[in-house]
Amino acid sequence: MLVGASAGCGKSSVAPVIPPLSRVTLDPPLDTLRIGDVASFVATAYDMLGNAVSGVSFGWVSGNPGVFRVDRLGRVFGVGEGTASLFVTAGGRSDTALVTVFPDTGWFVQPSSANGADLFGVSFRPDGATGWAVGEGGTILKTANAGASWEMQASHTAFNLHSVWFTSDLEGWAVGAGGTVLTTRNGGTLWTRLTNVNAGEVLMDVTFAARDTGWVVGSNGTILRTFDRGAHWSETRLATAFTLNGVAFAGTRDGWVVGDGGVIGGTHDRGLTWFVVPSLTSQPIKEVRRRSEAQAYAAGSQGVVPRTVSSPDSTAWQLRNAGSNFQLEGVSYPTDLIGYAVGADAALGGTVLRTDDGGNTWEVQAAHTGTRLNDVFFVDALHGWAVGQGGAIVHTARGGRR
C-alpha cells in the first residue's frame, strides 16, 4: 500500500508504509576484519507473519568507533584492534552482531615513545587494551588501545626499572635498580616510590598473587614479600649469591624463583622459607611463569627452557632446550600447551619462539625487529606484546602466525 503526499507543483511523492515488525536480523552474526578493511552486513526486517519486508530504513550504530565505524548502508570499516558490537534498529526492533578487528597478521612493530630507552618489562590487563612497559632510566609507558599508541608516565626515578605488575586496572607495581619499588593507585597517573623497603639491591621481578600478597626478587638472592599491600616488607635470601631474575606463584602459597647460574628455588609457605632445587644447568635463567601448582615454565641463556613435570609424589623440574643459539630473556604461557619465549639470536636479531606442546618443541617466528627482546606478555593464545632494546615494541593479534 502506498500513501501519496501532494506538492504544490502538482507532483506527488510516495513512501512505503512499513507494517509493524516482529524482528530484525543481522547477517552475518559475527565477522572479523583487518584494520583498514571493509565488511558488509545485511539487515532484514520481518512483519508479524514472519515475512521479509522491503523498503525499511535501518539505523546503524558502532558499539565502539575506536574499533570500527559503520555507514548508513551497513558497511563496517576497521579502525583499531578490538571487539565491539554492531547495532541495527528499525521499527522499534533491533539486532546485534559481534565485530572483531585485528591488525596485520604475525608480529609487527608498534610505535614507541620510549625515546630509544631499553625496555625490560611489559604487563597487560586481561582486556588486552591496557598495558604498561618499563625500562631504562625510569621509563614507564602506558597504552589504552592495545599498543596502537603509548604515552610516557612520570616515574620520578632515574633508576632502571626491570618489571611491572598490575593487580587491577588502577593498582600496580614496578621494581628496579637501587632497591626501587614503585606503586600507583590510579593507573600510573602518579607513581610513588616506597620508602619502607630496606633493600639496596638491583630488583629484577615483581609478582602479586592477590591485591595484598606479593613478592620481589633481585641480586644476591634477595626475596622481598608483603602480605599487606606493600605497607610492610620482609626480606629473605635464597642460599645463593646469584641474582634472582624471576618469580612466579600459583595461589598465595606455592612459588618459584629462578636466576643466574641456573638457580631455581621454591616455597610452599608463602615465601617464609625457601629450598633450592638441584642444579639442572649453569646457564642464567631469566624468567619463570606459573600456570598452576604443577605447571611452571622458564627460559634463559643458550636456549634453556626448563619446565616442571608431575610425578605421583611431587613436582620436579626438567631441562629442555629450544636451541643453544638463542639467548632467551622472557617467557609467557597463555595456555597449558601454547607458550612464547623471546630474546636474541646472532643471525636473526630479535627472536620470538612459539611452542604448541608445552615446551617440547619450538618454532621460530618472524619478530620484525633487529634488536634484542627482553620480555613478553600474552593475555590469551593470540594477543601478545614483546618489548626490548632501544624501546622496541612488537605485537601480534594472531598468535604470531600469518
Image: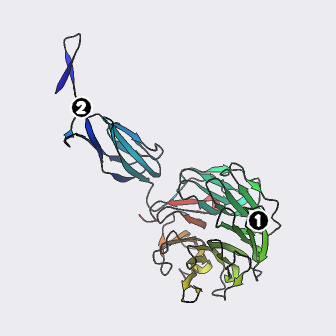
Residue that numbered label 2 is attached to = 18
- Amino acid type at image mark 2: Ile
Q: Nearer the viewer, residue 186 or 150?
A: 186
The relative height of residue 60 versus residue 183 in the rendered view (above or below) is above
Residue ranking furthest to the front: 48
Q: Left of 153 or right of it: where is 41?
A: left
Separation of residues labelled 2 and 1 (CA atoms): 70 Å
Q: Where residue 214 appears, x then y in whole percent?
A: 69, 67
Q: Is residue 270 left or right of residue 396?
A: right
- Residue that badge 1 annotates: 177
Q: Position of residue 384 (x, y in %)?
A: 52, 62
Q: Quadrant of residue 194?
A: bottom right
Q: Residue 152 appears at what percent x and percent y?
A: 66, 50
| Colour scheme of the picture | rainbow
Callout 2–callout 1 Cβ contact below 8 Å: no
Give whichever of 261, 84 is nearer the camera: 84
Vertical placement of 29 versus 342: above or below? above
Sequence-first disc among 2 and 1:
2
Q: Is residue 25 visible?
A: yes
Tell me the element at label 1: loop
Three-letter amino acid code at disc 1? Ala
- In the rendered structure, the answer to whether residue 214 lies left or right of residue 235 reads left
Q: Secondary structure at mark 2?
A: loop
Outermost residue, top side? 8
